[in-house]
Image (tube, rainbow, N blue to C red):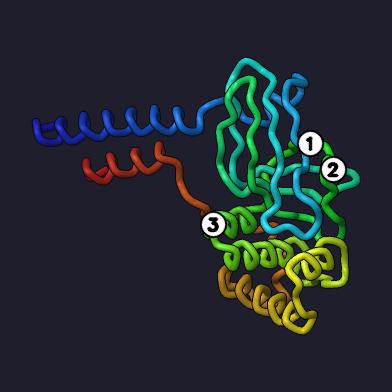
Amino acid sequence: MNIRVIGVVVIIVLFALTSGYISYSMYGGTGLKDVYSNKNIQVIQKTNAGSVPHEVTVKNNGNDAITVKKGETLASSISSNMVFAEDKSIGPKTEGTVKVFSLEPSKRAIAGTKLLPVNTTYDAVTQVIKSTDLSNSDSTYNAQLQIWEIMTGGNLNPYSGEPVALVKNKNLKWSQFRQDISKAKSDVMSKFNVNENELGSLKDKKLNIGQSWIDNTINYIKSSLGI
C-alpha cells in the first residue's frame, strides 16, 4: 500500500469519526422505545384531529438524552396511531414538541392521549416522510394522504375519522379532497413503481431508504482502494 493510499484512508477515517461525533452530538442519546419502559418518558398527543402534520410532546424526566427518529411509531388504543416525521434529541429533564403523521385514518387523534412507542413503520411510509418538506403545508398535506394510501392499500375511505376532521380543519370541498386523494394514490404508485393491484402488498416490500454515514464511509474506502 503506497503513501497516497494510506493518506486517503487516514483522512477518510478521521472524517468518519468527526461525522459520527457530530451526528451523535446532534441526535445522540438512547432510542425512545429502549427507555420508555423505565417510566421516565411520556409521549402525549398535542394536536387535535385533522392537523397536518400532527404534533406530540415528548417529556424526558430521566437523566440521559433520548432520541426520536423518523419512522418510529406511536400506538394508542383510543387515539390514532402516529409516526415520527423528524429526528430530534430531547435532553434530560426537558420536553420537546415533535412533528408526526397519522398512520390510522379510521380513528381520530385525541389531544392529551398518552402514546406508546412500539417499533418502526413500513419502509414505504418512511420513504415518503424522508422526502417531505415539513415547513411546506402542501408537502405535508400530500405526504399525509400518501401515507394513508399506503396504510390502507389504496382503499382510503375519505369519510372516516381523520380524513373527515382534515376536511373540516382545512375547510376543503369534498370534490377537491377526493381529487387530492386520487392524486396521492397515483403519486404512490409512481414513486414505488407499483400498479393499483399491488398497492395492498406495498407495506411488505423492503426498500432502499438510505445508508448510514458508516455504510457510506466504508463503501467510499473500498472504492478508493479498489476493493
Q: Are the residues at dot 2 and dot 3 in contact (C-beta closer than 8 Å)?
A: no
What amino acid is found at the position of numbered circle 1 in the picture? Leu
Q: Let me know if residue 85 appears in the view.
A: yes
Relative to 17, say whether 207 is above or below.
below
Circle 3 packing at 10 Å, graded few (<14), some (14-19), many (20+), is few
Q: SS of the residue at dot 1?
A: strand
Q: In the structure shown, which secondary structural element does the residue marked by tag 3 occupy?
A: loop
Do labels 1 and 3 touch, CB within 8 Å? Answer: no
Residue 76, label in figure: 2
Expressed as whole percent of the image width and height from the top left, the position of residue 126 reads 61, 53
Left or right, 55 with respect to 193, comes to right
Task: Check the image and report above or below for 19 versus 166.
Answer: above
* Residue depicted at 68% across the width and 74% down the height: 185
Return the x and y of residue 49 as percentages of the image width and height: 81, 56
Residue at the top extreme, as displayed: 63
- Residue 223: percent from left, percent from top: 26, 46
Which residue is label 1 attached to?
116
